[in-house]
Image (cartoon, rainbow, N blue to C red):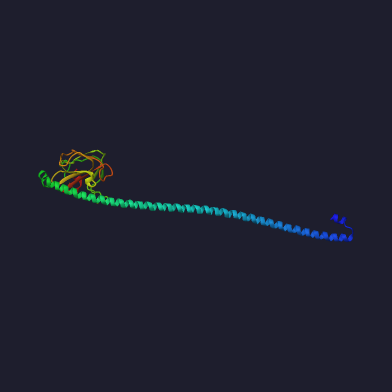
Amino acid sequence: MLTVVLETDGFEQLLENAAFLRRVGRQDRAIVLAVSKAKAGAERQEERLARLEAQQQVVTSDLGRERDRAVDLRDDVLAIETQLTSARDERQRSLDTLKVSSFRLQDELAGLERTQSRVQRTLTAAQSDNSDEFGTAPVGPATPAAGGWVMPVTGPLTSPFCEVRSYEACHPGIDIAAPEGTPIRVASSGRVVLIQSTEASGGYGNFTCVQHDASTSSCYAHQSSFATSSGASVSTGQVIGYVGSTGNSTGPHLHFEVRVDGGVVDPFNYI
């Protein structure tokens, strides 16, 4: 402003210059006001942008957590599907195994029934063949004191007479656990009327039956080997074989039967 006044050539020019300066001043003030407003607007926009960025970060964080949760849920669903598939496969395998076991047990039961019938017929025929030696009168249950019967082996009783099993209504005899190779002693004197190998016995494994009188016989199953022969006369306590696990057996033991007229009866009526 001082420069304009000093360089003015006259009062009229001074008035003109003063008017010009007023216009410049108004324009400067307008510019300053516009700049101030623009600055204030920019600050507000910056604050709003900051808030939006903060909100965006929150939303991004929430989305990240939701994405992670979705991934975890998907993994859980996949794991459950895998478990269900494995369970279905395992159930199917179990069903297949049960079917096979059922068929096997049915075959074994049919074999045992055939063997029972065959043993009964064989012993009935032996009674007839040995009628001259033993006579024909039936003999009642014997006791150790009266008849001199002895336990064929010593060991824990693992199956009582006529035990009900999944594949048979009445287990025909008793099972006595004993180590492999334990000597088996004949329970009472008599004649060996039946010896069958594992291949022929239908589940009994190596199998021996001894006739004691006109109606009574005893039988010994699952032997590892024989110690007598068919037709041999044996005395009470004589070794006729050795404990094993042949035939349908889950471990070394003696399956011991007493039969009257070919049918099984409780061995504890005799020993």
Residue 95 at x, y percent in the picture: 34, 53
Q: Position of residue 170 (x, y in %)?
A: 23, 50
Q: Quadrant of the C terminus?
A: top left
Quadrant in which residue 36 is drawn: bottom right
The image shows residue 39 at horizontal and vertical percentages of 71, 56
Looking at this rendering, what residue extends furthest in the front direction? 199
Residue 166 is at least partly visible in this image: no
Q: Nearer the viewer, residue 190 or 208?
A: 208
Residue at image x 57%, y 54%?
A: 60
Farthest residue to the right: give it: 10
Rendered view: 258 above or below 48: above
Q: Residue at x 18, y 49 (%)?
A: 120
Is 133 left, or right, of 81 in this rendering? left
Viewer-closest of 66 and 144: 66
Q: Which residue is outermost to the left?
A: 132
Residue at point 26%, 51% (across, down) = 107
Locate residue 245 relative to residue 122 in the image: left or right.
right
Q: Position of residue 100 (x, y in %)?
A: 31, 51
The quadrant of the rendering that contains the N terminus is bottom right
Tally of numbered discs:
0
Relative to 123, is 53 on the left or the right? right
Residue at x 31% of width, y 52% of height? 99
Kindly tell me whether residue 109 is visible in this rendering: yes
